[in-house]
Image (cartoon, rainbow, N blue to C red):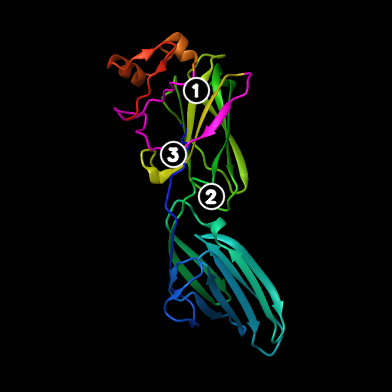
Amino acid sequence: MSLKSLSVGVLILCLIATSAGSSIAASPSERMGSGCEVEKPVRTIQDTTQVHFTVEFEGCDQVTISAKNKGDWKRETGFTIRSDGTEIQNVQFDTSPGDVHNWSFNLTPNLDIRDKNHTVTVTTYGNLTKYNFTRDINYTNGTEIPHTHIEDVKVTNGTIDGEPSTVAKVTLSNPSIQMYSTKLMVYTEGTDGSLYGASVAPGENRTITVELLEDRGTKVAGEARLYAGNISEREGGIDQVEFVGRAGTNTTTWNESYEPVKAPWRDDHYVYQNESIETGADRNGLVPDLSETQLLYAGAGVALVGLGGLKRLLT
């Protein structure tokens, strides 16, 4: 089933650093450029070959790393930087006595949007330092932090279990380095929820064929919801897209802010209806092959009005 959700969060940057490495070369608390209060933003760690690394948070979303060979001979060393458990980069290099090397990394695109608690770890040979910080991420507007989202929806004809069917081809895209365990829920006026596992590998696209209960050739209005966790909790919502179209023609899509709803398996579940778009449901009254839950709603007095559209019921 489909969940297109974008949960809204207020952007708060508050870094609290804890070190699993060596010495700290800064005062206990400093005010960074982006307005976040950071404890011990600058640290030094040393590998097993006398190469000293200085790690510094800048503006709460940038990390710079400087390495200096303080030994008496040329050597090979390296470091790995991880964000929320996912490797950003593994760097291996040769360095001569007195050499200094510098790198800079933008952390923002690599944060896991599902959590406000984040960890960045820098590891070198025999040593490491770890920063833990809190950041609520508003990923519902813009693309500051890449994440899995609904790229496109297309209503078309298909075959489900050997039978001709109306289907929605929902394309998901994951431009981030994170692997999100997401689910897709699709509602239409004739389909009270089709649920699918919807994880997408980093840097990949995936198209899911969703069975719909509308007759072939019917104009279909619906919504696709992408979420992690519980569909009825705003915190789990990642993306939400509404669509209208029919097989053989273009499908129109538009983004919506994610709204939590009660799942189809609940007695008082959510039913999608669209009052502004005339579809097959409007012309025919009850859509053929209504589910038992939809029929219960009809029997309970939820009016299905021809040409006026199905009256939207949000629970």
- List the residue tagged with mark 3: 258
> Which residue type carries mark 2?
Met
Report the side of 152 relative to 16 (left or right).
right
- List the residue tagged with mark 1: 221
Span colored in magenta: 248-277
- List the residue tagged with mark 2: 179
Task: Looking at the image, tell me whether mark 3 or mark 1 is earlier in sequence order.
Answer: 1
Q: Residues within 10 Å of mark 3 (few under 14, many from 20)?
A: many
Task: Looking at the image, tell me whether mark 2 or mark 1 is earlier in sequence order.
Answer: 2
> Which residue type carries mark 1?
Ala
As helix, strand or loop, the secondary structure at mark 2 comes to: loop
x then y, percent, for residue 89: 62, 63
As helix, strand or loop, the secondary structure at mark 3 comes to: loop
Q: Are marks 3 and 2 in contact (CB under 8 Å)?
A: no
Q: Is residue 255 magenta?
A: yes
Corner quadrant of residue 91? bottom right
Compared to residue 134, the image places residue 23 above or below, namely below
